[in-house]
């Protein structure tokens, strides 16, 4: 199982590198159907960070970062991956919490009724 996760993360990283600054039409911030089942620590996810850490989508719910993060020029802060950061997300009610192996923790708040991201970064 761990080998499949590593292989999936490597494939996503390579594809993200090929896409470079083009960015996806819809940022990938949710686990694909082939992803492993949720664990006690959350659902594996790739958080889109290219223009800073601002939004997250889990299933059909769109979330805003409680405290958006960027480097002041629209990029992720130092220590974050670009254009994605691998980690896990745990949803509880109207809150989603992203965590990664680097110790990053960021809380997102649901946007009730939202059907799209506020900003699509290019």
Image: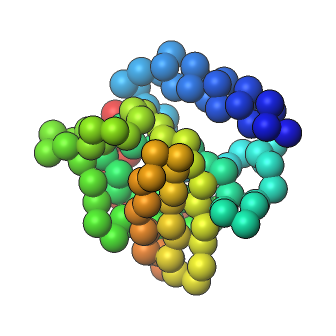
At a point 71% along the width and 31% down the height, the residue shown is 6
Residue 49 falls in image quadrant: top left
Q: Nearer the viewer, residue 87 or 64?
A: 87
Residue at the outermost top position: 18
Q: Position of residue 77 (x, y in %)?
A: 27, 43
Q: Say how the picture is coloured.
A: rainbow
Q: How many marks?
A: 0
Q: Is residue 13 above or below residue 40?
A: above
Q: Position of residue 38 (x, y in %)?
A: 76, 60
Q: Is residue 75 above or below residue 63?
A: above
Q: Position of residue 64 (x, y in %)?
A: 39, 66
103 with respect to 89 (left or right): left
Q: Quadrant of the N terminus?
A: top right
At a point 47% along the width and 37% down the height, the residue shown is 84
At a point 55% along the width and 42% down the height, the residue shown is 86
Q: Is residue 62 above or below residue 117?
A: below
Whether residue 114 is visible, yes or no, is no
Residue at the outermost bottom position: 93
Q: Quadrant of the C terminus?
A: top left
Q: Nearer the viewer, residue 9 or 111?
A: 9
Residue at the outermost left position: 72
Q: Is residue 21 above or below residue 81?
A: above
At a point 27% along the width and 38% down the height, the residue shown is 78
Whether residue 25 is visible, yes or no, is yes
């Amino acid at each position: 199982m761990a080998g499949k996760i590593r292989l999936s993360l490597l494939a996503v990283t390579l594809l993200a590198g090929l896409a470079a600054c083009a960015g996806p039409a819809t940022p990938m911030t949710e686990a694909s159907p082939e992803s492993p089942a949720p664990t006690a620590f959350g659902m594996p996810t790739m958080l889109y960070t290219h223009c800073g850490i601002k939004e997250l989508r889990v299933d059909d719910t769109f979330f805003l970062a409680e405290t958006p993060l960027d480097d002041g020029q629209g990029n992720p802060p130092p220590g974050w991956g670009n254009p994605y950061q691998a980690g896990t997300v745990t949803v509880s009610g109207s809150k989603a919490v992203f965590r990664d192996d680097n110790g990053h923790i960021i809380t997102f708040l649901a946007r009730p009724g939202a059907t799209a991201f506020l900003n699509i970064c290019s």
